[in-house]
Amino acid sequence: MIELNYQHLRYFWAVAREGNLTRAAELLHVSQSAVSVQVKKLEQSLGQQLFERRGRGLVLTDLGRVALDYADSIFQIGDELVRHVTEPGEGAPQLLRVGAQPTLSRNFQVGFLGPLMQRGDLKLSVQSAAVADLLERLEGRKLDVVLTNFVPARRSDGEWVAHLLDQQRVGLIGRPALARGRSLEELLREEDLVVPSRESGIRLRFDALTERLGIQVRLFAEVDDMAMLRLVARAHPGLALIPPIVVKDEIASGQLTEVLQLPELEESFYALTLPRRREQRLLFELIAGARAASRRASAS
């Protein structure tokens, strides 16, 4: 049975992150030979090599890359333990690491994180990447929460959970002059449309709606980013298929209006988290607050 020595693992981790023995030794304040010995002991206990020599450099083997992923998680959790013990007494800021799907409404993200903006005891990190990459970071304990507008398929060994935060209606948005009491069928036949890309859940449901109505719509543009969709909606003389929350400032100023609500279409917003951990108290307060705000909006 293999018994892992965490000092050996830390020396390996330093070499893997620094890229060579010399810098790792400087970081650890030990000799280069001491680092080399500790890494070899770890390799002996695992029964496989973690590095290969290429010229003067060291390159991780397949097992080495796996070991580095685990070491990242192990030592990050250790750092969280230290922060949990030391920071309350020192008044040090708490760090909340948020991953957000690139196409997610910026207004929704700001609304979700709004309660944190005035807090002086918090540091906020917001990262944007493909959802698959964000989930990998979440499961590697490199993120605390991932915000998306869909629930991705979960691997059999995945441990994250999905919290429904809100559901926003979707409408046909355009300039006020377009709001002339026309029916949905008339609007779809007469106006050019800006719509989300086919990867969007909104678009899938919209395509099903137009198929049922037997209408061939006049597509002007397909956009896969909500921030860009907002800009196009502001410039385009026709209609945009978009949740009103995305253009709430333009609607409030009168630049745009919700020409027609589409009650069959909704955009859902989710927070993906790991199972509850003690240091996530603030995160679950945020989730509870977002869900309560959604219920109040639905009731009004």
Image (cartoon, rainbow, N blue to C red):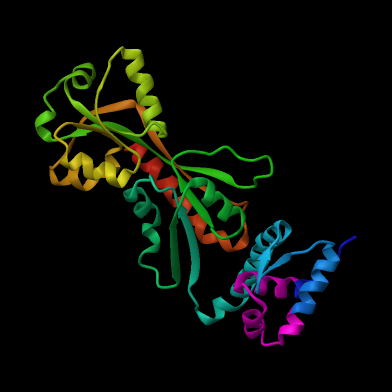
Please report the residue visible at 19 percent of the width from the left and 17 percent of the height from the top: 186
Residue lying farthest to the front in this orientation: 55
Q: Please, which residue is most extreme toward the right here?
A: 1
> Within the image, what quadrant is residue 57 found in?
bottom right
Report the number of numbered marks. Answer: 0
| Camera-side residue of 170 and 51 | 51
Location of the C terminus by quadrant is top left
Say whether residue 263 is magenta: no
Q: Nearer the viewer, residue 221 or 213?
A: 221
Residue 65 is situated, as x and y percent measured from the top left of the image, at 67, 59
Please give the name of the residue rendered at 65% of the width and 62% of the height, measured from the top-left corner: 73
Q: Is residue 33 above or below residue 203?
A: below
Task: Residue at 64%, 75% (x, y): give it.
Answer: 20
Is residue 16 a member of the stretch shown in magenta? yes
225 relative position to 43: left or right: left
Residue 89 % position (x, y): 56, 80
- The residue at the far top in this view is 214
Q: In the drawing, does residue 186 fall left or right of residue 224? A: left
Q: Main secondary structure of the magenta part?
A: helix
Of residue 49 and residue 196, the one placed in the foreground of this image is: 49
Q: Is residue 200 above or below residue 274?
A: above
- Give how far across and how far down residue 238 sits, in percent: 16, 31
The percent position of residue 168, horizontal first and vertical second, equals 36, 37
In the picture, measured across the screen, residue 141 lies left or right of residue 180, that is: right
The residue closer to the viewer here, 14 or 287, is 14
Magenta-highlighted residues? 9-35
Q: Which of the image's four quarters has the N terminus?
A: bottom right
Q: Residue at x 39, y 57 (%)?
A: 113
